[in-house]
Image (cartoon, rainbow, N blue to C red):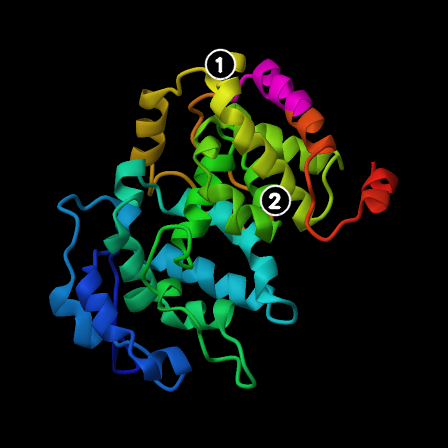
Amino acid sequence: MRATDGEIVATRIGMLPAVVAARAITPRVLEGYETPSFATLRENVEYPEDDSPRWDAEPIRELLTEARRRFADGSPTLSDAWLAPRLHYTMRLTRAEASDTRVWNFVGVCLDPDFVRWRWGRGGTGREVAQAARFAGRWDLQCFSRLWWAAELFRDGSNYRPAELACANQDILNTTMRLEMTQHRPTAQALLRLLHRGAVRTGRDVNAAAAAANAAGATLVFEALAPDEPQDADALREWIEAAGEDPLAQFETLPSGPNDGSVPHAAAEVLTARFGELFVDAPVRGKTDREGEAGR
């Protein structure tokens, strides 16, 4: 840890227990009148045993600072698509490590709670955050965890372009990502291809297509219809261990993720066609039959 203008700040990513995080997120913090202080929480933080550069806090802090600067004049929501792949690239975690909510509690409460308020603030002051879970909470709600997992679930091997597309659509982040079927890589890519090709256009379309595909999954058995290939665990491990050796995430160009194997094209195409057929008859909330026919 180091001091900046007398303030103690984190230099390493640690793990903040949920009970400690919950106590730190007081009503005044949620209302925007106070900010959690790392100085008062540091005694409760646990740190990873290894001293790998992947646990350095400064690259993450710089990335979040750039996101705020880059999207200062627009909606903070637009930062999701830019930030998610770069956060995933910078925070080189295994899925087991990323499943530990204590890591995300630390980032949201100790490292940069101001970013959480910037991204999720509302009301006349823009400071109030409605849900404590945006600071420390469930993986699909927490400010940073949701972006890391979106990049993980929707990347195509080293290619973050599909993840960028996914994070540009809030319905994918808020609804589709939680569905178990997105754990199957060809399924996740098929849903994105429908969006990319214009087969689905609106947020309601995305929800309807995902719901139809999810309902059909019990009988179609996606893994049998469109088998995936095993990911290269050694390539993933090498990518994780290269933290500190690879360049930092570039702000103007999309980085490359772990080269652990692309999604089989044929498998994704099979499901894209099947999901497109299902979507034709899927009910879309707020759309009349006449509108649905016109939109097809």
Q: Which residues are magenta?
A: 263-274
The residue drawn where x is 54% and y is 37% is: 160
The residue drawn where x is 50% and y is 67% is: 119
Which residue matches tag 1?
Answer: 227
Decide: is 82 above or below 213: below
Which residue matches tag 2?
Answer: 207
The residue drawn where x is 26% and y is 38% is: 96
Place of residue 14 in the rendered image (x, y in percent of width and height, measured from the top left): 22, 56
Q: CA distance from mark 2 to mark 1?
A: 24 Å
Decide: is 129 above or below 148: below
| Residue nearer the viewer, 93 or 193 | 193
| Residue nearer the viewer, 225 or 66 | 225
Q: Quadrant of residue 38?
A: bottom left
Graded by Cα atoms within 10 Å as few (under 14), some (14 to 19) or many (20 or more), the crowding at tag 2 reads many
State whether the magenta stretch is mostly helix, strand or loop. helix
* Residue 229 visible in image: yes
Seen in the image, is 24 located left or right of residue 123?
Answer: left
- Which label sits in the foreground, 2 or 1? 2
| Residue nearer the viewer, 140 or 119 | 140
Q: Amino acid at mark 2?
A: Asn
Mark 2 residue element: helix
Q: Amino acid at mark 1?
A: Pro
